[in-house]
Image (cartoon, rainbow, N blue to C red):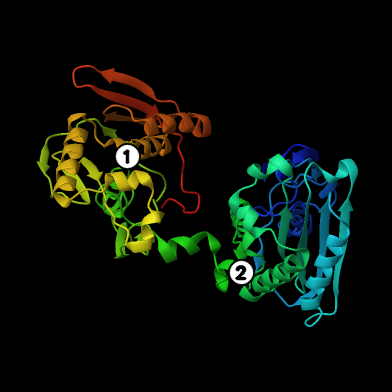
């Protein structure tokens, strides 16, 4: 996306895999992605993708040339909520280092489904040989349905075979998906019809691009059908169906509610409306949990803090899945653990690491209590799990000094400091405190403000 904001027209050459079963193909990029960019004001002149050589897994060998013009000032906000009716279907099959008849068989199978619904169906063949066929054999198809309102709904598929000692380089999942050309044509036709049926101005593959383009538009309203008429948002589908709320690897939803939310309040996030409601719980391996998180907006920017006194522990609410120790100065130090047991044939779905950690309830209570005491002993205004969040909040504050104390820097905290330096340009002054064994960090915030709200 950054290419459209460059100084002049750019032409980029890329080499590698052009068609596989995991990512949208170069044909889909040319037939669907580029027209979506035009909807948001990217100039048509100079916007093109030329396929010089094709490349299938595992060794690729493809080469494409992408030319991207620049936008004059900014993208154009759109109101794009009418997907219209399908008026034509276009497509292209590819085949590399296999018989050209593979492409014809795919076309015949796909048209056998489409011709019963729509007369205007044209699918072309692109058979490559020699150097232009890349380094591995493969075949596939890319289809795009154009609607009466200028929407492009796409679907594609690709099949590749390893030769001899190359078989170990293709994953087991891909080996299972290898299928004859006639099945490829019928399957991809059904997938495209499913994308059309679910509605929306873009297909599920391009939802992320649509949202990014809307977000990069000027401070004006941009509307896409994914929001208005409920086309299925694939980015949230898995979390709503089988989301794990408590496991032994990540902080639980209880820790998020009891510790993470109070830390946000310290930096000026309003208390009213800041809440996490646990509707259903979900443990590994199948999850099934559901939570509702409400987050209010800050009026202008976060509030800089000087937060170096962790105080003394005044209460510990108990032990179990999640523990939090609250100090006399309003610090929240947390630790949590979770144990889950598989039933019957589900045992194979729990990793070996989790199997080793299964323990009786009394040991869970003793272990988590020891972990929490260790977090308290090492000092600091937050526990090691929340160091990264603390540093990010300090970096996002106004251009004023924030000063915080933490215990031993965790690997995640150190990595967060590096990312803050690289992405926000904020550098922390780190000073160890030998008397307490803690570390004091100071920084001047980047002054990020809430542009979507006007300060009163």
The secondary element bearing badge 2 is classed as helix
Tell me the tag on residue 113.
none
Please state which of residues 69 and 348 is positioned toward the viewer in this rendering.
348
383 relative to 187, above or below: above
Please state which of residues 10 and 241 is positioned toward the viewer in this rendering.
241
Please state if 83 lies on the left or on the right of 391 as rendered: right
> Marks 1 and 2, how far apart in space?
37 Å
- Residue under the point 28% across and 45% down: 357
Q: Position of residue 330 (x, y in %)?
A: 19, 42
Q: Which residue is mark 2?
A: 225
Q: Which residue is mark 1?
A: 386
In the image, farthest residue toward the left: 314
Mark found first going from the N terminus, 1 or 2: 2
Q: Position of residue 12 (x, y in %)?
A: 78, 38
User: Label 2 neighbourhood size at 10 Å, few (<14), some (14-19), many (20+)?
Assistant: some
Residue 338 visible in the snapshot: yes
Residue 287 visible in the snapshot: no
Toward which corner of the image does residue 164 lie, by quadrant? Answer: top right
The secondary element bearing badge 1 is classed as helix
- Residue under the point 77% across and 74% down: 148
Q: Position of residue 192 (x, y in %)?
A: 70, 69
- Residue under the point 32% across and 51% down: 247
Please state which of residues 72 and 357 is positioned toward the viewer in this rendering.
357
Toward which corner of the image does residue 117 lie, by quadrant? Answer: bottom right
Please state which of residues 423 and 245 is positioned toward the viewer in this rendering.
245
């Amino acid at each position: 996306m950054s290419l459209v904001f460059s100084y002049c027209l750019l032409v980029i050459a890329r080499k590698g895999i052009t068609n596989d079963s995991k990512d949208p193909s170069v044909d889909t990029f040319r037939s669907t992605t580029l027209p979506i960019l035009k909807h948001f004001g990217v100039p048509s002149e100079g916007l093109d993708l030329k396929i010089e050589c094709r490349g299938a897994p595992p060794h690729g060998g493809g080469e494409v040339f992408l030319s991207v013009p620049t936008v004059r000032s900014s993208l154009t906000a759109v109101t794009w909520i009418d997907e219209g009716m399908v008026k034509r279907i276009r497509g292209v099959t590819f085949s590399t280092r296999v018989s050209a008849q593979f492409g014809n068989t795919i076309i015949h199978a796909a048209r056998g489904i489409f011709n019963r619904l729509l007369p205007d169906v044209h699918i072309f063949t692109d058979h490559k040989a020699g150097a232009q066929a890349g380094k591995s054999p493969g075949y596939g198809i890319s289809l795009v349905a154009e609607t009466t309102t200028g929407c492009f709904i796409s679907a594609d598929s690709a099949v590749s075979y390893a030769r001899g000692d190359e078989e170990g380089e293709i994953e087991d999942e891909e080996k299972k998906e290898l299928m004859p050309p006639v099945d490829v044509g019928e399957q991809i036709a059904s997938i495209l019809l499913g994308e059309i049926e679910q509605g929306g101005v873009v297909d599920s593959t391009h939802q992320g691009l649509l949202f990014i383009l809307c977000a990069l538009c000027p401070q004006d309203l941009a509307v896409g059908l994914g929001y208005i008429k409920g086309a299925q948002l694939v980015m949230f589908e898995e979390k709503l169906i089988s989301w794990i709320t408590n496991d032994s690897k990540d902080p639980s939803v209880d820790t998020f509610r009891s510790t993470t939310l109070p830390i946000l309040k310290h930096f000026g996030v309003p208390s009213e409306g800041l809440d996490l409601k646990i509707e259903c719980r979900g443990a590994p391996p199948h999850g099934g949990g559901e939570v509702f998180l409400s987050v209010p907006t800050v009026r202008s920017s976060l509030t800089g803090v000087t937060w170096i006194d962790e105080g003394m522990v005044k209460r510990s609410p108990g032990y179990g899945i999640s523990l939090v120790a609250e100090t006399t100065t309003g610090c929240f130090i947390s630790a949590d653990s979770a144990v889950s047991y598989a039933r019957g044939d589900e045992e194979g779905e729990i990793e070996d690491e989790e199997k080793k950690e299964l323990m009786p309830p009394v040991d869970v209570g003793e272990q988590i209590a020891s972990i929490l005491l260790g977090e308290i002993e090492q000092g600091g205004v937050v526990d090691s799990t929340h160091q990264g969040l603390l540093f990010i909040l300090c970096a996002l504050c106004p251009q004023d000094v924030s000063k915080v104390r933490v215990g031993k820097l965790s690997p995640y905290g150190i990595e967060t400091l590096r990312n803050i330096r690289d992405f926000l340009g904020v550098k922390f002054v780190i000073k160890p405190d030998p008397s307490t064994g803690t570390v004091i960090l100071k920084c001047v915030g980047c002054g990020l403000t809430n542009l979507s709200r006007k300060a009163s």
